[in-house]
Image (cartoon, helix red, strand yellow):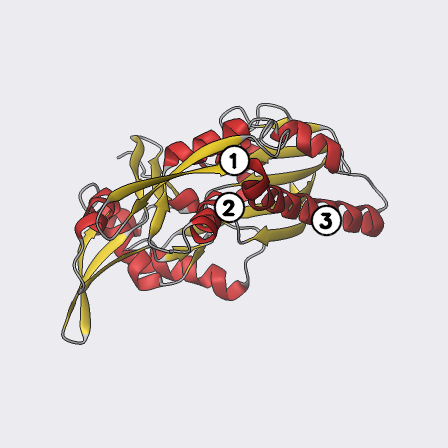
């Protein structure tokens, strides 16, 4: 009988599950829709169906993610997500005996790590192996980084993860609880002063494409659009680069600050230098990002993963070999 081996990635706002024999078996938003009945909340939908439910949910319903900034906030609801994702594919006995590799942010506490273990255990998985996300990113690369000091920066939707690896062994780590979703929220709050506005993916893509030239002139404008989640209405605004640049620049300046702080600490503590910076995560598609980082990072030898959104999951799958 073929042994089932699973990889689980909660990052990027999605729950993704990879089976060594079947490939990617689940790839949906890490969302749950619940309805309040008396003093209890009853689960209505999960994943993509929960996302669709969000637009017409009533006052006694709530759509949310039990994972915030890459950290599990509710092991019970996270387990519910996993049960719904795995239930139609595997029996309880199969899951009980299946090794499961799960990617976690590099700087989480032991308590936060236990949250991941509890979630998987409640979902029926007992043979659980924890792996840092930046380690996964390193494993995903074709290049061999043996005997090198590499700073890995995973810039995703919900967080940015930093880790210096010396010969693949973690040395220093940090997690910034900001990501692509944080930029969207800041835009909605700044220009509409309303947390019920969801900035569209097209606007996010436009901002990534404009990053290289957005600040060349204060008069340059870009159209941003959002969905008012209460009634589904789409609203738009034309914003000047002078207005929007503090949000975008502020975010990437924070990334540079943390990266340079880790590099300085590593150089001081080990008497060695970081030789390369390896980037992954969806924000790597930002046009002009590499040039910006070369100007501001202490280490200018920058590598961007060929498939940045999937680097962590690809690295996890390498552990199945």
Residue 193 in which image quadrant:
bottom left
Q: Which residue is mark 3?
A: 262
Residue 244 in which image quadrant:
top right
**Crowding at label 3, few (<14), some or many (≥20) Cα neighbours within 10 Å?**
many
Q: State the separation of the CA atoms marked 1 and 2.
A: 8 Å
Please name whichever residue, 259 or 311, is drawn nearer the observer in this view of the structure. 259
Asked whether residue 25 is in view, the answer is: yes
Q: Are marks 1 and 2 in contact (CB under 8 Å)?
A: yes
Q: Position of residue 46 (x, y in %)?
A: 23, 50
Residue 22 in which image quadrant:
top left
Q: Earlier in the sequence, mark 1 or mark 2?
A: 2
Q: State the separation of the CA atoms marked 3 and 1.
A: 20 Å
Q: Most extreme residue toward the front, as rendered?
A: 219
Relative height, residue 279 to residue 143 (above, below): below
Q: Position of residue 273 (x, y in %)?
A: 81, 39
**Crowding at label 2, few (<14), some or many (≥20) Cα neighbours within 10 Å?**
many
Q: Most extreme residue toward the left, as rendered?
A: 37
Q: Which residue is mark 2?
A: 179
- In the rendered view of the protein, which quadrant contains the N terminus? top left
Asked whether residue 318 is in view, the answer is: no
Q: Position of residue 159 (x, y in %)?
A: 51, 48
Please name whichever residue, 133 or 63, is drawn nearer the observer in this view of the structure. 63
Q: Does 239 sit left or right of 252 as displayed?
A: left
The disc at residue 283 is 1
């Amino acid at each position: 009988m073929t042994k089932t081996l699973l990889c689980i990635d909660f990052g990027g706002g999605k729950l993704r599950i990879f089976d060594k024999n079947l490939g990617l078996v689940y790839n949906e938003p890490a969302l749950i829709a619940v309805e309040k009945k008396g003093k209890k909340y009853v689960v209505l939908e999960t994943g993509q169906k929960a996302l669709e439910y969000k637009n017409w949910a009533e006052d006694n319903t709530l759509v949310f993610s039990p994972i915030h900034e890459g950290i599990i906030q509710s092991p019970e609801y996270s387990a519910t997500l996993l049960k719904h994702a795995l239930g139609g594919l595997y029996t309880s006995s199969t899951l009980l005996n299946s090794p499961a590799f799960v990617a976690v942010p590099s700087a989480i506490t032991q308590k936060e790590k236990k949250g991941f273990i509890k979630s998987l255990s409640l979902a029926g998985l007992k043979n659980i192996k924890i792996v840092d996300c930046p380690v996964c990113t390193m494993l995903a690369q074709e290049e061999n980084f043996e005997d090198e000091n590499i700073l890995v920066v995973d810039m995703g939707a919900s967080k940015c993860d930093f880790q210096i690896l010396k010969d693949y062994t973690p040395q220093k780590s940090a997690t910034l609880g900001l990501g692509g979703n944080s930029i969207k929220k800041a835009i909605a709050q700044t220009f509409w002063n309303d947390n019920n506005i969801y900035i569209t993916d097209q606007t996010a893509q436009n901002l990534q494409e404009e990053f290289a030239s957005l600040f060349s002139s204060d008069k340059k404008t870009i159209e941003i659009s959002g969905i008012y989640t209460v009634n589904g209405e789409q609203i738009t605004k034309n914003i000047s680069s002078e207005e929007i640049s503090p949000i975008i620049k502020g975010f990437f300046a924070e990334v540079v600050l943390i990266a340079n702080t880790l590099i300085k600490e590593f150089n001081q503590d080990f008497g060695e230098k970081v030789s390369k910076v390896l980037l992954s995560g969806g924000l790597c598609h930002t046009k002009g990002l590499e040039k910006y980082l070369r100007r501001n990072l202490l280490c200018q030898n920058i590598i961007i993963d060929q498939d940045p959104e999937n680097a962590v999951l690809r690295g996890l799958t390498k552990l199945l070999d």
